[in-house]
Image (tube, rainbow, N blue to C red):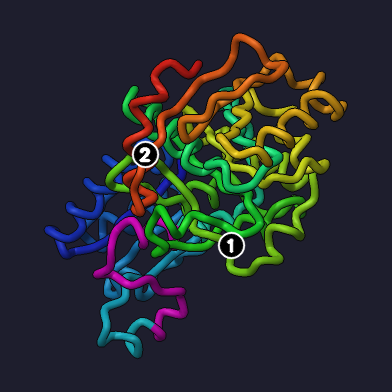
């Protein structure tokens, strides 16, 4: 179910630009209605219900807006006093539209009483994991994500590392993923709507992502059930979900393994990595339960031998200090990896 948004503004050029952009970029999330006169806006309020309204102050004054889930007055920098007279929350008018959409979707999500919402279609989930650190999990995850984008898929990258590496690859100008963490497990609000509101899209690779948690402890505070809910909700808003995981193999990791359609087990040429992979495949009871999903990714030009015969994919060594250039260069080498 799409969010019903009405834009009520007599600033014709601005209103049309705003309406066209949101209709084009968020067509699967938001249904936009545009009106440019007070009379038309009043008539709409008498016949329709809207989840969100973006309203010029002169069109809002004196009208009954109680039927709108989240009415927001479009605020200009010099008009705080005038807007305060309406008694309605405000939103900055002349700002980046994607930031505006994120802001009102977050507000709408918190006010919603419909929970996560039902969704019959789920993304293909790829979990990227290793028992060894430093083997290039994030590089592999992002290379695969970029490959799927090149195939025309909508791809969401979810980083579950305790210390997020997201800022090394993507801009951090949006809302933190911690906003979603706060809503998990409490049965209040619409997590899916919030997820849509806070995810960003990298202009270069086209991969969608979340800004890092606000605090280190935010990730550790999540239970296995929280992680399962987050994974399921994220899988409901995209075609492909790529999850970059920590090196531990606790109950939260196992929840992701259970939900994943495939698991990339990443190793490199180091002795420590080979030893840890060998221990996992020979001694850990989780291995037998997921081995049919496993694909071994031998990163950095590694040559390895393990119990996972027939499913080893070798990636070349790319020498660069620019982490973004590395994963983009490797995306072409992911062509033979199952997808």
Residue at 36% x, 48% y is 324
Question: 208 above or below 166?
Answer: above
On the image, which quarter does residue 102 sit in? bottom left
Mark 2 surroundings within 10 Å by alpha-carbon count, few (fewer than 14), some (14 through 19), many (20 or more): some
Quadrant assignment, res 333: top left
Residue 92, picture quadrant = bottom left
Q: Position of residue 184 (x, y in %)?
A: 71, 52
Left or right of residue 295: residue 2: left
Do the numbered discs 2 and 1 sit on residues whose CB atoms are within 8 Å?
no
Secondary structure at badge 2 equals loop
Query: Where does residue 200 sit, x and y in percent of width and height?
Result: 41, 51
Residue 83 in sight: yes
Any magenta on residue 20? no
Q: Which residue shows up at 34% across the image and 52% down it?
A: 322
The answer to whether residue 124 shows anywhere in this view is no
Question: Residue at (50%, 32%) from the top-left corner?
Answer: 299
The magenta stretch spans residue 100:
yes
Q: Mark 1 points at which residue?
A: 213
**Disc 2 versus disc 1: nearer the observer:** 2
In the picture as drawn, the residue positioned furthest to the front comes out as 271
Camera-nearest residue between 237 and 74: 237
Q: How far apart are marks 2 and 1 (CA)?
A: 29 Å
Question: Which numbered circle lies on residue 40?
Answer: none
The extreme bottom residue here reads: 81
Q: Nearer the viewer, residue 334 or 313?
A: 313
The span picked out in magenta is: 84-104
Q: Tell me what residue is drawn at x 42 percent, y 44 percent.
A: 208
Task: Give the percent coordinates (x, y) of residue 183.
Answer: 68, 56
Looking at the image, residue 235 sits to the left or right of residue 95; the answer is: right
Q: Nearer the viewer, residue 18 or 326?
A: 326
Which residue was labeled with disc 2? Answer: 318
Give how far across and how far down residue 232 sits, in percent.
65, 35
């Amino acid at each position: 179910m799409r969010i019903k948004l009405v834009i009520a503004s007599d600033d014709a050029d601005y209103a049309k630009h705003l309406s066209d952009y949101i209709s084009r970029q968020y067509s699967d999330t938001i249904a936009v209605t545009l009106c440019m006169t007070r009379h038309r806006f009043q008539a709409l309020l008498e016949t329709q219900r809207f989840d969100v309204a973006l309203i010029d102050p002169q069109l809002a004054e004196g009208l009954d807006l109680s039927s709108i889930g989240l009415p927001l007055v479009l605020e200009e920098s010099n008009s705080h006093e005038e807007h305060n007279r309406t008694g309605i929350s405000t939103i900055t008018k002349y700002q980046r539209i994607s930031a505006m959409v994120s802001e009102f979707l977050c507000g709408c999500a918190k006010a919603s009483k419909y929970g996560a919402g039902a969704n019959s279609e789920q993304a293909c989930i790829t979990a990227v994991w290793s028992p060894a650190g430093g083997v290039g999990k994030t590089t592999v995850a992002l290379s695969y994500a970029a490959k799927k984008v090149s195939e025309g898929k909508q791809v969401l990258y979810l980083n579950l590392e305790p210390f997020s590496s997201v800022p090394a690859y993507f801009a951090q100008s949006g809302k933190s993923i911690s906003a979603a963490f706060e809503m998990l497990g409490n049965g209040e609000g619409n997590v899916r709507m919030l997820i849509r509101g806070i995810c960003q899209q990298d202009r270069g690779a086209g991969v969608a992502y979340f800004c890092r948690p606000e605090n280190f402890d935010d990730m550790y505070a999540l239970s296995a059930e929280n992680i399962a809910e987050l994974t399921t909700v994220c899988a409901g808003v995209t075609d492909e979900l790529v999850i970059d995981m920590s090196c531990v193999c606790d109950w939260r990791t196992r929840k992701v393994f259970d939900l994943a359609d495939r698991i990339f087990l990443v190793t490199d040429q180091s002795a420590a990595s080979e030893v840890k992979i060998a221990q996992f495949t020979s001694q850990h009871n989780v291995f037998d339960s997921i081995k049919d999903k496993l694909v071994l990714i031998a990163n950095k030009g590694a040559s390895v031998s393990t119990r996972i015969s027939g499913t080893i994919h070798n990636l070349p060594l790319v020498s660069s200090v620019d982490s973004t250039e590395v994963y983009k260069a490797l995306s072409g080498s992911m062509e033979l990896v199952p997808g």
